[in-house]
């Protein structure tokens, strides 16, 4: 019972981590710092569990992994659902996996070139295509003129 409530708390903490911190700005540059901080909390949590389990190493490892996994489910579940259904680019057509990650593009261009993939996507989805979590592509000349030159007066 206690472990279930702690896991639910970890899931909620993962969601709040995304909504309170990771959703604001680009954090890929800070990935080493985030990973070190997460590792520090993981070791700290393991030590607390180890002393709480009266020195039973296996139980402390299992509990720490369970709580860490619950946090990851909350964090990444929140990220994926936000990118897929609530992001400002959600109205642009494109492959569903493109909404959540750029990994789908990397896997697709292993056997192809990126320009051929983009041409295929524009043939399928039209002038505007969502090609990544924060990226939309356009082949419409008028849109490029609008972006580069601004609205004409």
Image (cartoon, helix red, strand yellow):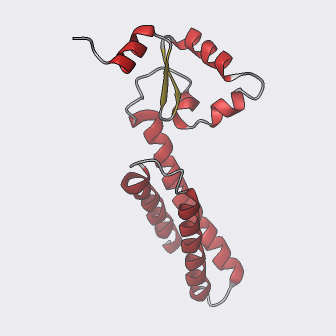
Residue at the location (46% across, 38% down)?
83
* Vertical side of 138 occupied by 97: above or below: below
Residue at the location (42% across, 15% down)?
144
Q: Give the x, y percent position of residue 101.
A: 57, 37
Q: Give the x, y percent position of residue 94.
A: 53, 21
Name the residue furthest left.
153
Residue 15 falls in image quadrant? bottom left
* Number of numbered markers: 0
Name the residue furthest right.
111
Task: Please state, as top left, top right, bottom left or bottom right, where the C terminus lies in the image.
Answer: top left
Query: Nearest the camera: 128 or 83?
Result: 128
Left/right of residue 7 with respect to residue 21 in the rendered view: right
Residue at the location (61% across, 18% down)?
118
Residue 86 falls in image quadrant? top left
Query: Nearest the camera: 72 or 122?
Result: 122
* Vertical side of 19 occupied by 38: above or below: below
Q: Give the x, y percent position of residue 135.
A: 49, 30
Residue at the location (60% across, 72% down)?
64
Q: Give the x, y percent position of residue 70.
A: 54, 60
* Vertical side of 94 occupied by 51: above or below: below
Residue 106 falls in image quadrant? top right
* Vertical side of 148 occupied by 44: above or below: below
């Amino acid at each position: 019972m206690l472990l279930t409530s702690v896991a639910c708390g970890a899931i909620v903490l993962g969601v709040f981590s995304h909504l309170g911190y990771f959703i604001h700005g680009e954090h890929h540059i800070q990935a080493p710092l985030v990973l070190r901080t997460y590792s520090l909390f993981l070791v700290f949590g393991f030590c607390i569990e180890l002393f709480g389990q009266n020195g039973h190493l296996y139980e402390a490892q299992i509990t720490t992994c369970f709580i860490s996994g619950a946090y990851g489910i909350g964090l990444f579940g929140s990220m994926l659902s936000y990118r897929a259904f609530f992001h400002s680019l959600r109205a642009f057509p494109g492959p569903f996996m493109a909404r959540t990650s750029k990994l789908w593009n990397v896997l697709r261009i292993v056997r192809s070139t990126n320009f051929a993939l983009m041409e295929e996507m524009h043939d399928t989805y039209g002038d505007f295509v969502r090609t990544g979590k924060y990226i939309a592509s356009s082949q419409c000349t008028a849109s490029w003129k609008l972006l580069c030159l601004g609205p004409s007066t």
